[in-house]
Image (cartoon, helix red, strand yellow):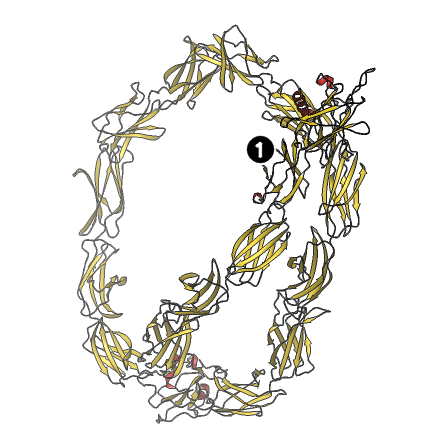
């Protein structure tokens, strides 16, 4: 019975529902023993749930129902430690030792009982037993107040005990069943080896006594989020793993043992998950620094630890706050491999991630590339860099292409590259390699260029030029330098482009025949290589070589000797390619005669000047007189318009013959024929004319004596003969054009096949005749003979009469579609054959030639139905006569006549076009051989026809007739129409979910039966055939909500027709509909089981409790739940679901649900200061009783609390610590349920104090110091801002009080903002500091004059900051400094007020700032002003070779003067010298007479010169020296007439020793017999007019003419032709009496003159 009672209470445990509340609950369960057990025994079940360590006491109240549950509020209330059971006795019963007010106190291993009894005295017996314990007896003790007590100790924890109290006096009994409290585990720990980033593993020792299960609760410290797990107590595994935890978070885990309805006090332990390692470690390496950054891992982290190690151990290590995600390591060794470990730290645990990092190796030092004079080798040397390295990669490049690569060990400091290209510039990269990193250093080197090869200098036959040839060197080079030496004198020094292989030296006035030395230097970069050779100019040939005399057997030549050096002459005579005469002559020879030559031959006479091993020649061409032809003959050779002449060739050389044709003393032909011709044909002559022929031999333009002969032409024949038959078959007419020349008469002959038919003589004035009665089609020959004297000539022609035509032409087709036959009667007369042509629309189809004995022709393979035109022509020669007729072939029937379509009332036929020509189609429809419709006529383009309005199901005959002209052909097929389909199919479910009824209207026309088929997804389910009188059918056993297709087929014979309709059954409703809030305040989750059958969707209706619709949603048929959101918290709703399938709806399914109350929302911090936090929130939706607000410190201790009604929306906490993070929790109370929201808020941190900045006279550094901020501080952020406001640098740290910033812009003013961080809140303090500016560099001076200059400097660089420059100078004079630019930062100033020629020392330094200035170091430079120029320069001639100059010295500091004298016309410097400052007069000697000179004088002050002062003057004249005695005008070369003298001279006759010869004049004097007498040396002489009109004057001069002898080096050989007395323009031209000028006029006849050239 006791076991049954225990089982009962265990069953009733399942009906108790707990709430989501943190309140302590005290549950009392009472019952009526009579109703439960049927005896007077009392059974008590106690279910206590608590979260404290207090002992649980139970108390039985007999008046309460056994299933009633009482819940106490969250606020703890005193716990009753004793339970009392009272039992009322019946009225009037005797006093017994009844057991009243039974109370007990239970612990884990003991039970204390107490009870009262009204009877007295009483003696009780108390027994206690359990299933696992022995029977135990307790002796009760009676107390003074009459109560009884009994104690049981040493019991088993968590065990059910059955206690029986029996009165030994009267047998009254009371039974009590109770359970001892379970004990918690003795040990409860976290297993260290079970800690990961997301898991914690706990284990415990088994509790003493009985345990049904263990309750474990995991509570996260940051979020207070709890997670509970129950572990059965009987398992051997006493451990539990919590997974999916937040890395780096601290958790509190509690365990309590539960036995039955009792639970032991909790045992707690705390532990943390390991923090996640950092992710995505990124590095930026340099030679001595590493910048590392990372991304935080999941979860929480307190701080990061950074450890940098190398092979020897730790190098640097530091700890960073959790918000730092980057760090810089500096001062590292280049090229070294480091291990960087980033350690995540949280709650005393660590996790790490590492990365191997290597710093960039340093560059090599002093990298040099040299060639050591080698053409193909480069030497590379360097010094090893600091730090670590593995090896060197040395790469040789040319134009970006790798030529060679070497890997060298780290101790090597040099290498060689061989087999390189000479003269090439190479790039050498030396890569310092350490691991996978390298650093590149680059240098450049060039090999020595190679010399040119095969260098030679050739005159190319030039007198004053040399051609230098060479082969280019191998390798690279940039240019050539060419130097020409005349012994030790450099005549030429020039450069040429590299692509040239030759250079012509000209324009230097080289002397003919002289030997010169040439240097060709190859230049590549700054390197050179030189090759040398020698060359000689060619000697100058003789001048004015010409032929003096020639006859048939001799030639005489003459020349003028050259103005050059030579040893002798060689004269030669060339005959074609042979030299027939070659003779050496003395140097003085000037002419030579060649004899025994051939007539008419062209000879080349050459005079060669010999000078050393070189020679030069001049040639002249001469020709002897040609000989006369012999045996000249003239004949006509029977031609009427030409003559043929022939002769025997002349002796010697002949170029051509000149042939003249003379008629009636008029030359009508003048022809030249080649020398190899001995005959000539004259054409286009007048027939019968008498002609004379003259032949002259011509050789080289020289003509021989003439040869003459006569001849006569033959008369010509007629032309333009025309024979015409005039289209007649018996007639020919003949006409012609008269013959050219003399004609006596014409003879006309008509013949056929050699037989003369007619002959007639016609007078010469007539030109036509005719012949009649000729045979048709016959060919006749016509001959017309022209007669003139004894000569005659014929003209021939042919012509034919027109043939006759055929008769009786007929055409027939013989009833065939591709055949025509043509026949006719023969033509008369002569004819060759017949030609039969068949055409269609003037297009030739076929042509046949039929022999003359045939009279018919057949054409096959014609187009059916086509109309043809046939022509039969009688052919005779080129003439023909035609007859024409027409005929048509029979048409073909259509092809592929097909019934292509049919319907109930239509038939559609198609066909392919009939072959051949078709005019139209005729379509006939027959039924029982009777025409249904009148015939249809279609154009020949149709290939289809549709018959409409037919009877369904009827068989028709269709005939198609092809018509072409009057011919036709037919073909036919049969066609059957389709029966009609039923109409008005109606399908209805009749409200059923499993059946459909089909009804239709009968089909028209003939019908045999109907077949009804139902389909599901195109698969037939059932088929039924009914008679044609039935029009409905019902299908059963279908699926609910499914769509079915029904086909009703009409059958008639072999054809059928279908009608289709669709129907759907009614869908079924859903099952087990339920709505739950799932602990949500704003949503309800509706769940159900799918409806039977098919459903497309579910329509879900949300209604208020009163039935007002709020929402109508749809879900697909696959859904089994729907969530309604945005609902009102705590509100009750109704939910209805309809199953929808194709527009049909099922019956409604309905349920109810209610939402949970809502928590406060929009919780936020509205204001925060250093000591206050203000919060606000939005009132919770739905029903609300009150708010309770808690503020917690970071260590979870309570800082403050308050409460308020439902209208409270904000609250502020005062007197808080700066920078501290607080947690505010607001609990919403609504009835018995609660909900809470929380938020973290932090007070503003304090800022640092006493912030200061210093530059310590550094250009790129600033130092800042400060005092720490008060309160809670996480870290400091140092933000240094550039002068333009952009951020320069940011540093992070926690315990910082100073910082040194480097790498700043010189002269810049920087702002340091120190940000105090506490969480995400900050406070700032700032100050400013300015670096020292960079000094200027590279001071330079420009526009230096005598009193002013511009000073300029470079820098500071543009990226630095500065505002102005300060300028100072020595000697300290009062100067004017101006800034010509608008900006004070301009890098230049204008200085005025300087003393001319003085040396000044200037210094400049940069200034940064306007008020608080910083100054850079000074940069100095020296400059000297230009001295003033001299004054009053005056130069004058002293004599013919000297001039004197004087001047006034300037007021300046100067050292001396620089004097330069040069010719004004050529700018050639004659004198240049520097003289002392004390002199102011100077004489310039050894000048050229009568030459204008320009004198320039500059004042010198150290390296400065003044402006130049110039003056010019001309030296006195000095007469040129006379020509040598042997140079005279040769009388043989002069041409003398009655009034003029023609002679020549050249520039080489006159010397320019005393100055250049600029002008010539001719002085003419009447000779007195003394040729040595020279003209008077005074100027001017009389003019020609004075000489002419004054007989006492016997001398005069012409006008001056320019010499042009100095225009070029070759002008020395320039010749002048003078025609004295011929009014020559160069001599002044014709004299004009009205003008007084020098001129030229005729000389006196038979008067001796002496002409002198004066220059």
In x, y percent, where is residue 714? Answer: 20, 53
Quarter of the image containing the N terminus? top right
| 176 is higher (above) or lower (below) than 1236 | above
Q: Secondary structure at mark 1?
A: loop
| 1360 is higher (above) or lower (below) than 1037 | below
Quarter of the image containing the C terminus? bottom left
Q: Nearer the viewer, residue 137 or 1231?
A: 137
Q: Nearer the viewer, residue 1231 or 1602?
A: 1231
Local packing at callout 1 (Cα closer than 10 Å; few below 14, some 14-19, many 20+) is few
Task: Tally the marks.
Answer: 1
In x, y percent, where is residue 1419? Answer: 62, 76
In x, y percent, where is residue 387? Answer: 50, 65
| 894 is higher (above) or lower (below) than 1213 | above
Please tell me in which quadrant of the rendered image residue 266 appears. Answer: top right
Q: Is residue 1614 at all visible to an observer of this figure?
A: no
Q: Nearer the viewer, residue 1068 or 1472?
A: 1068
Horizontal side, residue 776 vs residue 1641: left or right: left
Horizontal side, residue 66 vs residue 1611: left or right: right
In x, y percent, where is residue 964? Answer: 38, 20
Q: Is residue 1050 at all visible to an observer of this figure?
A: yes
Q: Nearer the viewer, residue 1520 or 1444?
A: 1444
Kindly identify which residue carries mark 1: 235
Horizontal side, residue 170 vs residue 1006: left or right: right
Please tell me in which quadrant of the rendered image residue 290 appears. Answer: bottom right
């Amino acid at each position: 019975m006791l076991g049954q009672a225990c089982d009962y209470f265990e069953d009733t445990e399942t009906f108790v529902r707990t709430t989501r509340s943190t309140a302590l609950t005290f549950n009392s369960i009472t019952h009526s023993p009579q109703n439960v057990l049927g005896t007077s025994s009392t059974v008590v079940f106690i279910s206590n749930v608590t979260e404290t360590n207090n002992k649980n006491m139970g108390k039985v109240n007999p008046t309460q129902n056994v299933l009633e549950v009482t819940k106490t509020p969250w606020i703890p209330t005193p716990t009753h430690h004793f339970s009392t059971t009272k039992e009322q006795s019946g009225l009037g019963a005797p006093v017994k030792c009844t057991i009243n007010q039974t109370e007990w106190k239970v612990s884990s291993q003991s039970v204390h009982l107490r009870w009262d009894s009204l009877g007295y005295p009483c003696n009780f017996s108390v027994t206690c037993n359990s299933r696992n314990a022995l029977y135990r007896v307790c002796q009760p003790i009676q107390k003074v107040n009459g109560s009884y007590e009994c104690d049981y100790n040493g019991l088993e924890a968590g065990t059910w005990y059955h206690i029986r109290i029996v009165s030994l006096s009267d047998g009254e009994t009371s039974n009590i069943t109770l359970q001892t409290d379970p004990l918690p585990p003795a040990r409860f720990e976290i297993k260290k080896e079970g800690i990961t980033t997301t898991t914690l593993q706990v284990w415990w020792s088994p509790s003493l006594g009985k345990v049904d299960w263990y309750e474990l609760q995991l509570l996260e410290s940051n979020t207070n989020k709890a997670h509970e797990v129950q572990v059965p107590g009987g398992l051997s595994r006493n451990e539990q793993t919590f997974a999916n935890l937040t890395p780096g978070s601290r958790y509190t885990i509690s365990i309590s043992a539960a036995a039955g309805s009792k639970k032991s006090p909790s045992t707690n332990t705390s532990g943390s998950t390991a923090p996640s390692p950092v992710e995505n470690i990124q590095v930026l390496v340099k030679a001595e620094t590493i910048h590392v950054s990372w991304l935080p891992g999941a979860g929480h982290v307190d701080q990061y630890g950074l450890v940098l190690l190398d092979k020897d151990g730790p190098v640097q290590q530091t700890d960073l706050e959790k918000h730092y995600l980057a760090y810089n390591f500096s001062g590292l060794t280049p090229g070294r491999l480091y291990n960087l470990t980033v350690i995540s730290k949280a709650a005393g645990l660590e996790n790490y991630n590492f990365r191997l990092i290597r710093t960039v190796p340093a560059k090599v030092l002093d990298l040099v590339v040299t060639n050591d004079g080698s053409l193909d080798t480069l030497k590379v040397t360097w010094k090893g860099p600091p730090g670590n390295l593995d090896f060197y990669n040395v790469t040789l490049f040319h134009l970006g292409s790798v030529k060679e690569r070497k890997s060298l060990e780290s101790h090597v400091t040099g290498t060689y590259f061989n087999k390189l290209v000479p003269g090439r510039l190479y790039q050498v990269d030396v890569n310092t390699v350490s691991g996978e990193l390298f650093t590149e250093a680059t240098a450049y080197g060039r090999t020595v260029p190679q010399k040119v090869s095969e260098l030679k200098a050739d005159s190319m036959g030039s007198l004053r030029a040399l051609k230098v040839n060479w082969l280019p060197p191998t390798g690279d080079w940039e240019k050539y330098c060419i130097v020409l030496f005349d012994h030790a004198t450099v005549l030429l020094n020039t450069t040429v482009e590299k692509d040239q292989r030759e250079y012509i030296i000209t324009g230097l006035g080289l002397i003919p025949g002289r030997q010169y030395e040439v240097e060709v230097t190859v230049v590549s970069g700054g390197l050179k290589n030189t090759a040398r050779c020698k060359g000689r100019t060619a000697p100058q040939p003789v001048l004015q070589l010409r032929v003096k005399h020639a006859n048939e057997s001799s030639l005489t030549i003459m020349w003028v000797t050259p103005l050059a050096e030579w040893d002798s002459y060689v004269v030669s005579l060339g005959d074609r390619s042979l030299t027939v005469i070659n003779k050496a002559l003395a140097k003085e020879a000037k002419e030579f005669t060649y004899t025994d030559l051939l007539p008419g031959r062209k000879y080349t006479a050459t005079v060669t000047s010999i000078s050393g091993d070189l020679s030069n020649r001049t040639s002249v061409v001469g020709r002897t007189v040609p000989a006369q032809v012999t045996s000249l003959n003239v004949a006509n050779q029977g031609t009427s318009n030409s003559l043929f002449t022939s002769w025997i060739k002349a002796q010697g050389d002949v170029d051509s013959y000149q042939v003249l044709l003379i008629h009636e003393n008029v030359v009508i032909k003048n022809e030249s024929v080649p020398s190899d011709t001995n005959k000539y044909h004259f054409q286009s002559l007048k027939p019968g004319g008498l002609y004379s022929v003259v032949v002259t031999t011509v050789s080289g333009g020289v003509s021989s004596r003439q040869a003459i002969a006569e001849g006569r032409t033959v008369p010509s024949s007629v032309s333009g003969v025309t024979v015409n038959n005039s289209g007649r078959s018996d007639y020919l007419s003949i006409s012609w054009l008269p013959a050219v020349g003399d004609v006596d008469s014409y003879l006309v002959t008509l013949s056929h096949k050699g037989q003369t038919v007619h002959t007639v003589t016609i007078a010469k004035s007539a030109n036509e005749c005719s012949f009649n009665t000729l045979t048709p089609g016959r060919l006749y020959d016509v001959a017309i003979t022209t007669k003139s004297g004894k000569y005659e000539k014929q003209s021939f022609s042919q012509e034919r009469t027109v043939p006759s035509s055929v008769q009786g032409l007929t055409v027939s087709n013989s009833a065939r579609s591709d055949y025509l036959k043509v026949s006719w009667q023969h033509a008369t007369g002569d004819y060759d054959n017949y030609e039969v042509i068949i055409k269609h629309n003037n297009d030739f189809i076929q042509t046949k030639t039929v022999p003359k004995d045939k009279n018919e022709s057949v054409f096959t393979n014609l187009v059916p139905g086509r109309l043809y035109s046939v022509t039969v022509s009688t052919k005779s020669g080129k003439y023909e006569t035609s007859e024409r007729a027409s005929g048509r072939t029979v048409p073909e029937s259509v092809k592929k006549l097909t019934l292509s379509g049919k319907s109930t009332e239509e038939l559609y036929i198609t066909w392919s076009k009939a072959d051949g020509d078709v005019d139209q189609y005729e379509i006939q429809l027959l039924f029982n051989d009777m025409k249904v419709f009148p015939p249809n006529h279609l154009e020949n383009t149709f290939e289809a026809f549709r018959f409409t309005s037919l009877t369904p199901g009827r068989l028709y005959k269709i005939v198609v007739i092809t018509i072409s002209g009057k011919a036709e052909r037919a073909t036919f097929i049969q066609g059957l129409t389709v029966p009609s389909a039923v109409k008005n199919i109606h399908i209805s479910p009749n409200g059923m979910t499993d059946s459909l009824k089909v009804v239709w209207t009968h089909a028209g026309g003939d019908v045999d039966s109907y077949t009804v088929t139902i389909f599901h997804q195109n698969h037939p389910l059932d088929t039924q055939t009914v008679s044609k009188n039935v029009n409905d059918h019902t299908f059963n056993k279908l699926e609910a909500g499914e769509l079915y297709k029904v086909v009703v087929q009409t059958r008639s014979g072999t054809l059928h027709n279908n009608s289709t309709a669709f129907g759907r059954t009614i869908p079924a409703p859903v099952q087990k509909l339920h709505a739950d809030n799932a602990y949500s305040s704003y949503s309800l989750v509706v769940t159900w089981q799918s409806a039977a059958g098919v459903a497309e969707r579910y329509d879900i209706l949300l209604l208020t409790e009163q039935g007002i619709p709020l929402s109508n949603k749809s879900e697909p048929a696959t859904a089994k739940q729907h969530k309604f959101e945005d609902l009102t918290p705590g509100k009750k709703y109704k939910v209805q679901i309809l199953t929808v399938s194709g527009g049909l709806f099922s019956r409604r399914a309905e349920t109810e649900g209610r939402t949970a109350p809502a928590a406060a929302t929009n919780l936020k911090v509205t204001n925060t200061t250093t000591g206050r936090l203000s919060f606000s929130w939005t009132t919770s939706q739905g029903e609300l009783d009150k708010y309770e607000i808690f503020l917690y410190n970071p260590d979870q201790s309570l800082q403050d609390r308050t409460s308020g009604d439902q209208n409270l929306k904000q609250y502020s906490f005062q007197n808080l610590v700066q920078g501290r993070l607080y947690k505010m929790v607001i609990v919403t109370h609504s009835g018995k349920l609660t909900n809470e929201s929380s938020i973290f808020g932090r007070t503003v941190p304090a800022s640092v104090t006493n912030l200061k900045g210093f530059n310590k006279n550094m250009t790129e550094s600033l130092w800042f110091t400060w005092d720490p901020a008060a309160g809670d501080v996480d870290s400091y952020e140092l933000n240094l801002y550039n002068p333009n406001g952009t951020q320069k640098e940011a540093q992070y740290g926690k315990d910082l009080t100073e910082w040194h910033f480097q790498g700043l812009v010189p002269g810049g003013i920087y702002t340091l903002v120190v940000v105090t961080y506490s969480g995400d809140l900050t406070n700032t303090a700032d100050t400013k500091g300015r670096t020292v500016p960079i000094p200027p560099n590279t001071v330079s001076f420009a526009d230096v004059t005598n009193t002013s200059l511009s000073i300029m400097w470079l820098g500071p660089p543009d990226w630095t900051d500065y505002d102005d420059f300060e300028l100072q100078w020595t000697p300290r004079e009062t100067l004017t400094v101006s800034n010509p630019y608008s900006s004070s930062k301009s890098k230049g100033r204008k200085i005025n007020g300087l003393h001319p020629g003085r040396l000044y020392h200037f210094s400049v330094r940069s200034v940064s700032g306007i008020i608080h200035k910083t100054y850079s170091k000074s940069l100095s430079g020296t400059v000297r002003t230009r001295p003033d120029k001299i004054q009053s320069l005056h130069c004058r001639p002293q004599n013919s070779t000297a001039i004197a100059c004087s001047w006034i010295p300037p007021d300046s500091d100067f050292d001396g003067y620089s004097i330069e004298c040069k010719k004004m016309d050529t700018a050639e410097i004659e004198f240049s010298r520097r003289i002392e400052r004390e002199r102011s007069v100077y004489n310039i000697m050894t000048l050229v007479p009568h030459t204008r000179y320009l004198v320039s004088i500059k004042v010198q002050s150290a390296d400065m010169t003044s402006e130049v002062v110039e003056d010019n003057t001309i030296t006195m004249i000095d007469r040129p020296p006379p020509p040598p005695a042997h140079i005279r005008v040769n009388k043989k070369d002069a041409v003398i007439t009655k009034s003029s003298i023609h002679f020549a001279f050249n520039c080489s006759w006159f010397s320019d020793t005393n100055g250049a010869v600029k002008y010539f004049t001719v002085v003419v004097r009447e000779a007195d017999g003394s040729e040595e007498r020279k003209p008077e040396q005074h100027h001017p002489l009389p003019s020609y007019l004075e000489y002419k009109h004054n007989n006492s004057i016997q001398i005069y001069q012409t006008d001056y003419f320019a010499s042009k002898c100095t225009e070029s080096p070759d002008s020395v050989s320039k010749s002048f032709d003078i025609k004295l007395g011929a009014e020559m323009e160069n001599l002044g031209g014709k004299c004009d009496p009205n003008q007084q000028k020098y001129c030229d006029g005729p000389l006196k006849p038979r008067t001796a003159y002496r002409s002198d050239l004066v220059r």
